[in-house]
Image (tube, rainbow, N blue to C red):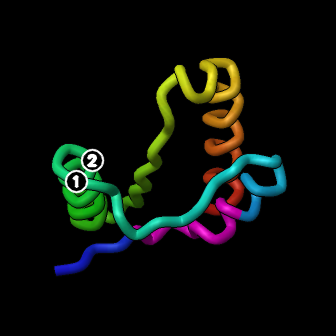
């Protein structure tokens, strides 16, 4: 059974790209833990009438913590604007 997010991911993506973030939409959360967390968060949200979104972020060795914190703030703003 396929379960998809009900979030407006295109609007979120557009907002983040406008902020010059290198982001993309993927229908694959990865394997094992990430896939498990994504699938179960979607199912739980669906059962409770809520929304869920899974976001992969790189290690701090690849993109520093300050940049990732700015990204997180921008992501939360984009989600709030899209809801």
Q: Are marks 2 and 1 in contact (CB under 8 Å)?
A: yes
Give 44 or 62, whichever is nearer the viewer: 62
User: Where does the magenta region start and end?
Assistant: 5-13
**Percent coordinates x, y for residue 53 in the rendering:** 43, 55
**Percent coordinates x, y for residue 47 in the rendering:** 22, 65
Front disc: 2 or 1: 1
Taking the magenta stretch, the answer to whether it contains residue 2 is no
Give 41 or 35, whichever is nearer the viewer: 35
- Residue at x-position 23% and y-position 48%: 37
- Quadrant that contains the N terminus: bottom left
- According to the picture, the residue beneath numbered tag 1 turns out to be 31
Secondary structure type for disc 1: loop
Asked if residue 9 lies left or right of residue 44, the reply is right
- According to the picture, the residue beneath numbered tag 2 turns out to be 34
Q: In this picture, is 35 found above or below 9? A: above
CA gap, disc 2 and disc 1: 6 Å
- Residue at x-position 63% and y-position 21%: 64
Q: Quadrant of residue 5?
A: bottom left
């Amino acid at each position: 059974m396929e379960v998809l997010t009900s979030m407006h991911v295109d609007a979120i993506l557009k907002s983040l790209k406008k902020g010059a973030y290198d982001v993309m939409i993927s229908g694959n959360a990865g394997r094992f833990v990430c896939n498990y967390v994504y699938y179960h968060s979607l199912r739980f949200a669906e059962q409770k009438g809520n929304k869920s979104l899974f976001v992969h972020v790189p290690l701090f060795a690849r993109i520093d913590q300050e940049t990732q914190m700015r990204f997180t703030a921008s992501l939360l703003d984009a989600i709030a604007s899209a809801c």
